Image (cartoon, helix red, strand yellow):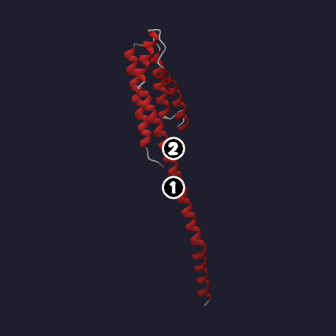
Amino acid sequence: MNSTVAVSAVGIVVAGVVGPALSGWAARRADAQRFRREQSGKRRDDLRAVVDEAARLLALGATNIREIREAQAGDHAEPSDVRDWASNVHALQQRLLLRVPASDPVATTYQDVRDALIALDRPDGQGLEDAVRDFEQKRMAFLSAARTSLESAVS
């Protein structure tokens, strides 16, 4: 009878204390993992929005630089939308750096594109067509790095 009482007591303790404690721990752990995945997904969506805006801005790069050069050559003021575009390109880099580290391929390739845009704006630099070709290559490298980053698995 003592062994029956002991087995019953152990059964009650396991069913009433250990089982619910393990179950609660597993549920908390699963909730924490789900929360981290959701946060990672939200960060990726935010990065996607910034990358989309970068792609939109950079698509106008060569055209806007040509407009700036034409305005400078004709001693005209550059159009206000082009001036706004140039400041948006710089501000977007800052927004990007809030989302990824400076060493991330997305950030480094964006910096390369921005440097190529600055080179396009220098009339004493390389020829315009060579500078545009360099800019387009760097823009495609940025888009490729961004695509790779956005396609990686959410952990």
Q: Quadrant of residue 135?
A: top left
Q: Nearer the viewer, residue 137 or 48?
A: 48
Q: Residue at x 46, y 48 (%)?
A: 154
User: Is residue 125 among the parts visible in the rendering?
Assistant: no
Q: Residue at horizontal 54%, vertical 58%?
A: 31
In the rendered view, does 137 fall on the left or right side of 1?
left
Name which residue type carries label 1. Arg
Q: How far across and down, in percent of the image, does residue 58 sit?
A: 43, 27
* Element type at mark 1: helix
The amino acid at mark 2 is Arg
Towards the viewer: 123 or 29: 123
- Residue 16: percent from left, percent from top: 60, 76
Return the residue nearer the eye: 2 or 14. 14
Q: Residue beneath label 2, please?
A: 43
Q: Earlier in the sequence, mark 2 or mark 1?
A: 1
Name above or below for residue 27 compared with residue 78: below
Image label count: 2
Answer above or below: position of 69 versus 61: above
Residue 25 makes an appearance in the image = yes
**What label does residue 34 carry, if any?**
1
Residue at 44% x, 41% y is 150
Dot 1, how many residues are within 10 Å of its Cα: few (below 14), some (14-19), or many (20+)?
few
- Marks 2 and 1 sit apart, C-alpha to C-alpha, by 14 Å
